[in-house]
Image (cartoon, rainbow, N blue to C red):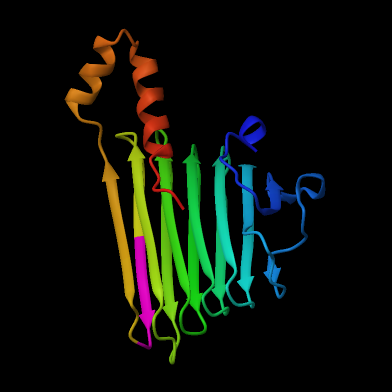
Amino acid sequence: MWGKFNIKTFPAETVVYRDGVFCPELSTIVGTDFYKKYDKPIHIIYIGEIAGNCRLDVNVFVENQPVFLTVKIKNKKPAFLNIFIKNAGKNSDVRGHIMLSNENELKFNCTAQHIVSDTTILIKTKLIAERNSLSQLSGTAVIDSNCENTNSDISFSALADKTARIEFSPAQRISSIPTSANHSAAIYQPTMPQIEYLRGAGLSGAQVNDTLREAFMNDFDLF
């Protein structure tokens, strides 16, 4: 998927959505409700431009299944992206990298629910907020009762124009003691040494901005 979408891939079963529409020609399996154990990891790719209300449900009902979620979207019109993740598979992992570029009004919500013990849901969201944009990002981690040894992390970070408005709304509903349960939200600001270094390398002002944005969006830990 690198050549088509600029997304790193690995040997996996794929489920691909472009502009909110399922792409059977790029997918090896159908749907995001997983009742069957696959030998390979599952990679869900949600890419393109969105508008209006969009929703993605990821439900894991099988044990020992790794699931990776890559979201890379932008909007030029008002949009709402709602992602619901339910992990009901013991020793199954759901890990997501979500990259948002907002040029208008964007609401994003991620709800991550642990149904059984020994489950993992780790979701990292990065936002580029353009000039005069409004971004509202919320995330809720839900750990049901009798769900010990769970790992939960929903994090947000943003690179924003000075005129952009951003609202973060993290929440947790924890009914049993997890191994870890983290939440974070941060605004990234380039430092003057970073900017001066890039200018000293001969980059124009626009090239400096593009380089900083690319570095910000691609600075993810490995799955």
Q: Residue furthest top?
A: 202
Image quarter of the N terminus? top right
Q: Residue at x 42, y 30 (%)?
A: 214
Residue 66 pos. (x, y %): 57, 64
Magenta stretch, residue numbers = 169-176
Q: Is residue 179 left or right of residue 55?
A: left
Q: In the image shown, does 29 or 133 lie closer to the viewer?
A: 29
Residue 40 pos. (x, y %): 66, 59
Q: Quadrant of residue 168?
A: bottom left
Q: In the image shown, does 104 or 55 lie closer to the viewer?
A: 55
Q: Residue at x 49, y 69 (%)?
A: 111
Q: Is residue 109 above or below residue 91?
A: above
In magenta segment, residue 102: no
Q: Quadrant of residue 61?
A: bottom right
Q: In the image shown, does 149 or 136 lie closer to the viewer?
A: 149
Q: In this orientation, does residue 51 appear?
A: no
Residue 218 pos. (x, y %): 43, 38
Q: In the image shown, does 213 or 109 lie closer to the viewer?
A: 213
